């Protein structure tokens, strides 16, 4: 059984740029890079979404999008913590005013 090949983010970005920036067809880019046409299509779709400012659902291709994903996750975590603290302080204040 053969193991699955892994490609770096730089390789994927470069392959996608062949289609998006240099005018290659997906088939030409796939042959030039030695990968499947499906991979080129997937990387191109992801890269196009990243370039338009969308955060990808899966792993990010560019380093910047990876950082954005981490920051979005951290914001979500902090907002949840903040909500918990607000509710806890409200309960504390409510219990102190009953005395």
Image (spheres, rainbow, N blue to C red):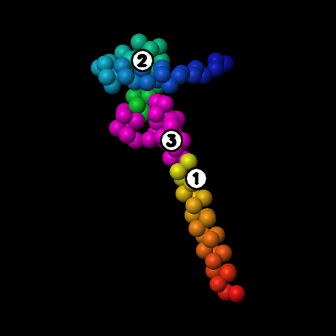
Q: Distance between the residues labelled 3 and 1?
A: 12 Å
Give the quadrant of residue 99: bottom right
In magenta stretch: residue 64: yes
- The count of marks equals 3
Q: Which residue ends up furthest to the right in the rendered image?
A: 99
Disc 3, disc 2: CB below 8 Å? no
Q: Which mark is residue 94?
A: none
Q: How crowded is mark 3: few (under 14 residues within 10 Å), some or many (20 or more)?
A: some
Q: Determine whether the residue tagged by mark 1 lies in a helix, strand or loop.
A: helix
Residue for point 38% across, 37% down? 49
Residue for point 60% across, 70% down? 87
Residue for point 40% across, 35% down? 50
Q: Residue tagged by mark 3?
A: 69
Location of residue 8 with respect to 84 vertically, above or below: above
Place of residue 81 in the rendered image (x, y in percent of width and height, measured from the top left)? 60, 58
Q: Residue tagged by mark 1?
A: 77
Q: Residue tagged by mark 2?
A: 30
Q: Determine whether the residue tagged by mark 2 lies in a helix, strand or loop.
A: helix
Give the quadrant of residue 28: top left
Q: In this view, does 23 lie to the left or right of 66?
A: left
Q: Is residue 68 left or right of residue 90?
A: left
Which of the two residues, 37 or 51, is positioned nearer the viewer here? 51
Q: Which residue ends up furthest to the bottom in the rendered image?
A: 99
Q: Indicate which disc, 3 or 2, sits on the residue closer to the N terminus.
A: 2
In magenta stretch: residue 40: no
Of circles 2 and 1, the one toward us is 1
Q: Distance between the residues labelled 3 and 2?
A: 28 Å
Highlighted magenta segment, given as a residue range? 48-73
Place of residue 58 in the rendered image (x, y in percent of width and height, measured from the top left)? 51, 38
């Amino acid at each position: 059984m053969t193991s699955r090949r892994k490609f770096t983010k730089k390789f994927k970005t470069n392959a996608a740029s062949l289609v998006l920036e240099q005018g290659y067809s997906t088939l030409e880019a796939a042959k030039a890079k030695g990968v499947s046409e499906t991979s080129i299509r997937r990387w191109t779709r992801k890269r196009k979404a990243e370039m338009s400012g969308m955060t990808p659902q899966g792993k990010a291709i560019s380093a910047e999008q990876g950082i954005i994903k981490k920051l979005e996750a951290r914001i979500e975590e902090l907002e949840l913590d903040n909500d918990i603290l607000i509710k806890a302080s409200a309960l504390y204040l409510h219990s102190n005013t009953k005395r």
